[in-house]
Image: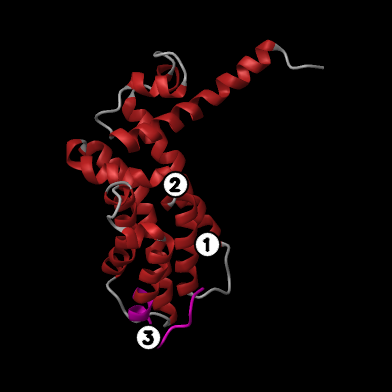
Amino acid sequence: MGETGSSRWQRKKDARPGEILDAALTLFVDKGYLATKMEDIARAAGVTKGTPYLYFQNKEEIFKAVVRETIVARVHAMSAQLEQLHGFSSSQLLMLALEDWWIHIGSTRAAGLCKLMAAEATNFPELTRFYYDEAILPARQLLGHIIQRGMDSGEFRPLHLDYAIDTLTAPMMMTMILSHSFALVPGCCDSISQDPLQFLKTSLQLMLQGMHQTAPQDPQ
C-alpha cells in the first residue's frame, strides 16, 4: 500500500527542525551570528519566512539548539563511551578522546562555532555564557577526569589540573579557529591545514611526554 500525501507531508514536517538547524549552522559559521537573519535561515532551509518560528522562538534559540545538537550532544556521548572503556591507560583515553572529537566535531562545520564565539563573545555575553556552560565546561570536565585518573594512578606526575586542561585544549581551539580563518587563505597555515589531525596528535604526544612520571608508551 503506497504512502499517502498526508503521511509524506508529515514526514517532511518532522524533518524541518533538523533542516533549519543544518542551514543555521552553515550560516552562523560562514556569516557570523550578528549577520545571520531569521529570513536567511528560512531561505537556506528552503522554507517560508515564518516556518522557523513554528519551532524556535527566535535566532538565539536556534543558535542554542545548533550548539546542543552538535557539540554538546557529542561531548556527552563521548563521556558515556569513555566510561565504558576498561583496561586503557589515561594516555590512551586522551588519544581516543582526541580522535573522537576530531571525527565528530573538529573536522565538521560545527568546529566553526569556536571561531564564531571567539570573534563575537563580548557582543553577546549571554550566548557566550551559555556556550561556556554547555559546550566548553563539560568538555573540560571530561578531560579533567582523565587527567585526574592518570595522576591518581601514578601514570601522570602531579599537575595543576586546570592548567593541564588548558594546555591540552589550546591546540584544539587553535585548529578550529585557524581552519575557519587563516587556513582559508592560500599559503597561510599550510602545516596545520594539510593534516590537522596529525598536528593535534603530535601536540598531544609532546604534552604527554611532559605529563608522564617516566618515559611514556606510544598511546596509539
Q: Residue at x 50, y 65 (%)?
A: 96
Q: Earlier in the sequence, mark 1 or mark 3?
A: 1
* Residue at the spot 44% in from the left edge and 46% down from the top edge: 108
| Within-10-Å neighbours for mark 2: few <14, some 14–19, many 20+ | few
- Residue marked by disc 1: 82
Disc 3 residue type (three-letter): Gln
Q: Amino acid at mark 2?
A: Thr
* Front residue (pair 164, 200): 200
For residue 108, which numbered disc appears in the image? 2
For the point 29% across and 61% down, which residue is it? 170
3D distance between C-alphas at marks 2 and 3: 35 Å
Is residue 2 one of those drawn in magenta? no
Of label 2 and label 3, which has the lower sequence position? Answer: 2
User: Residue 169's spot in the image, x, y percent?
Assistant: 33, 61
Q: Secondary structure at mark 3?
A: loop
- Disc 1 versus disc 3: distance between alpha carbons? 23 Å
Q: Is residue 109 above or below residue 154?
A: above
The amino acid type found where label 1 is placed reads: Leu
Place of residue 211 in the rendered image (x, y in percent of width and height, measured from the top left): 35, 78
**63 or 23: nearer the viewer:** 23
Q: Position of residue 110 (x, y in %)?
A: 40, 44
Which quarter of the picture shows residue 117?
top left
Q: Are marks 2 and 1 in contact (CB under 8 Å)?
A: no
- Secondary structure mostly taken by the magenta-highlighted segment of the chain: loop
Q: Where 177 sits versus 218, above or below?
A: above
In the structure shown, which secondary structural element does the residue marked by tag 2 occupy? loop
Work out which residue is located at the far left of the displayed protein and give it. 122
Magenta stretch: give its range: 207-220
Spatial CA distance of label 2 from label 1 is: 21 Å
Neighbours of disc 3 within 10 Å: few (<14), some (14-19), many (20+): some
Q: Identify the residue position indicated by label 3 in the image.
A: 213
